[in-house]
Image: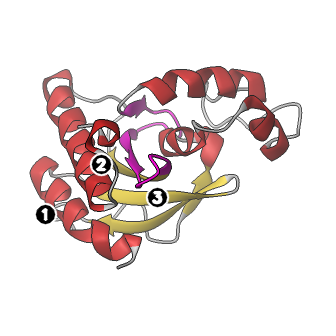
Amino acid sequence: MELVDLCQPVLAQLANAINYRCNLAIRDERAVVYIARAPAPNTLIGAMNVGSCLPAHGTVVGRILLSELSLEALRALYPEPALERFSPETPHDVESLYALLQRDRLAESVVGESYFESGYSSIAAPVRDHTRDIVAVISTIIPSSFIDPAQSEHLLQAVRRSASTFSTLLHCPASAAGG
């Protein structure tokens, strides 16, 4: 069974639980590619369509997907002296990106409030396979510059649980699946 087919029930359950659109993304070189999505109940449009691509270094989803790369691998991927900026929080060079990725690597999830685009926030968590490598990211996009503190913990836990559930479906050892 393919990644997209396996994740669809997990994404749908997450979207129903948190009432926001949810996505599954992978990395293709320097881009994040959205390969599956589940709309929130009672919504007609989605913020991110399947097939949409965004710059990996400029998104929280991409940061998770890049987090296992070494500094040398990042330099090979981004040989230019300065990285394109999308917000004041976007790292300006590979060394800044690497430092940020080191913090992300230790986290169960990453939150970005207006990180890529003003007016939108994201919560993302890694999906790991049987080798414990990150193979995808489950995320939700919240149409707000900031995440309501009253909802924050609920949203974080729900996204983490879904990523852990999906990791388990990919035969990731329980100790590495998170959740």
Q: Is residue 92 above or below residue 168?
A: above
Q: Amino acid at mark 3?
A: Ala
Q: Specify whether residue 72 is painted magenta.
A: no
Q: Specify whether residue 110 is painted magenta.
A: yes
Identify which residue is drawn at 27% across, 54% down. 168
Pick whichever, 33 or 128, lies toward us. Answer: 128
Q: Earlier in the sequence, mark 1 or mark 3?
A: 3
Secondary structure beneath label 3: strand
Q: Is residue 50 left or right of residue 143?
A: right
Q: CA distance from mark 2 to mark 1?
A: 20 Å
Eye-nearest disc, 2 or 1: 2
Identify which residue is drawn at 20% across, 43% down. 161
| Total tally of numbered discs in the picture | 3
Q: Is residue 30 above or below residue 69?
A: below
Q: Position of residue 119 (x, y in %)?
A: 41, 38
Q: Which residues are magenta?
A: 109-134
Q: Residue furthest bottom?
A: 1
Q: CA distance from mark 3 to mark 2?
A: 12 Å
Q: Earlier in the sequence, mark 2 or mark 1?
A: 1
Q: Position of residue 24 (x, y in %)?
A: 39, 59
Q: Which residue is mark 2?
A: 163
* Numbered mark located on residue 41 in the image: 1
Eye-nearest disc, 3 or 2: 2
Pick whichever, 107 or 14, lies toward us. Answer: 107
Q: Amino acid at mark 1?
A: Pro
Identify which residue is drawn at 41% across, 50% down. 128
Secondary structure beneath label 1: loop
* Numbered mark located on residue 25 in the image: 3
Q: Earlier in the sequence, mark 3 or mark 2?
A: 3
